Image (spheres, helix red, strand yellow):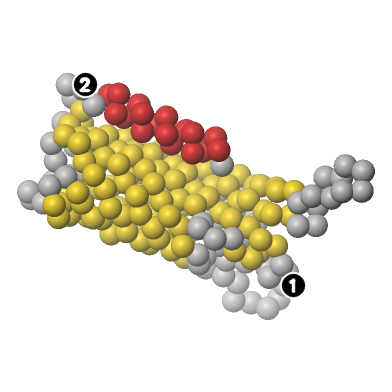
Amino acid sequence: MRRSVLASACTLVLLVALAPAQDVQRIDAIVGAGELFASKFLSASRAYQPPAENGGIYPSFGAEGILENRFGISAEGAIRFSRGTYNGYQPYRPMFFDVNGVFAPRINKRISLDLAVGPGFSTVLFYNQFGSCSTGNTFCRTNLNSTHFLVHVGAGPRYYFHGPFFVRPEVNYYFVVNNVEFHSGNVLRLGGSVGYSWGSR
């Protein structure tokens, strides 16, 4: 998780550093929240079925840089705020990180679109309460994680409600490759965000 946050921070610094470049039109900083939705098993033919990767509130953060031709790049992350319970017994916390190519057409003075697609990864942190990292007779909790490659597609209209401040309802779809811990690799995150833009809209 620390590496992911560091990578996102470095991306933001890179975007800000590129701002003086002649072709960079706009830099955005964005925070938001959403909820996860995914399908689940409808059959009772298996015991201990992988659960659906849904529910929970996911705070998100990101940065975006747009060039004069309305294309650009973005980086974002979304981390479950509170731990979930995996199949009723094990605490866990999913995280999603992605880097995207972006197209941001302008509709009018206050409204534009954000259309994004790109690769990323999903990490599920399992809090193993029964694992042991013994030192003598002392036991401590251990954390295990599972990481998978993903493809992200996102879309949302943004509305500038006050100067450089904007709001954006958004849809984010993830296809998580080999997502064996859950029923499906098709995951949807629905939510909204607020942001601030530097430069021309």
Q: Is residue 64 visible?
A: yes
Q: Point out residue 188 in the picture as x, y percentages from the top left corner.
A: 43, 60
Residue occupied by mark 2: 21
* Residue at 40 percent of width and 43 percent of height: 76
Residue name at image x 39 percent, y 58 percent: 33
Q: Is residue 14 left or right of residue 50?
A: left
Where is residue 19, by image quadrant?
A: top left
Q: Where is residue 78 in the image (x, y as percent from the top left)?
A: 45, 50
Residue at the top extreme, as displayed:
21
State which quarter of the image contains the N terminus.
Answer: top right
Q: Residues within 10 Å of mark 1 (few under 14, many from 20)?
A: few
Mark 2 is surrounded, within 10 Å at the Cα level, by few (under 14), some (14 to 19) or many (20 or more) other residues, namely few
Residue drawn 56% across the image and 54% down it: 94
Between 69 and 20, the one nearer to me in the picture: 20
Instruction: Identify the amino acid type marked 2.
Output: Ala
Going from N to C along the chain, the mark reached first, 1 or 2, is 2
User: Residue sitting at 34 percent across and 50 percent down?
Assistant: 31
Q: What element carries label 1?
A: loop
Residue for badge 1: 47
Of the two numbered discs 1 and 2 in the rendering, the one whose residue sits closer to the viewer: 2
Residue 135 screen position, x and y as percent: 88, 42
Question: How far apart, in angstroms, are the residues tagged by discs 1 and 2?
Answer: 58 Å
Helix, strand or loop under label 2? loop
Quadrant assignment, res 93: bottom right
* Numbered tag placed on residue 155 in the rendering: none
Report the residue that reaches farthest toward the left. Answer: 109
Horizontally, residue 24 falls left or right of residue 101, namely left
Which one is nearer the viewer's eye here, 122 or 58?
A: 58
- For badge 1, the amino acid type reads Ala
Question: Does residue 149 appear in this view?
Answer: no
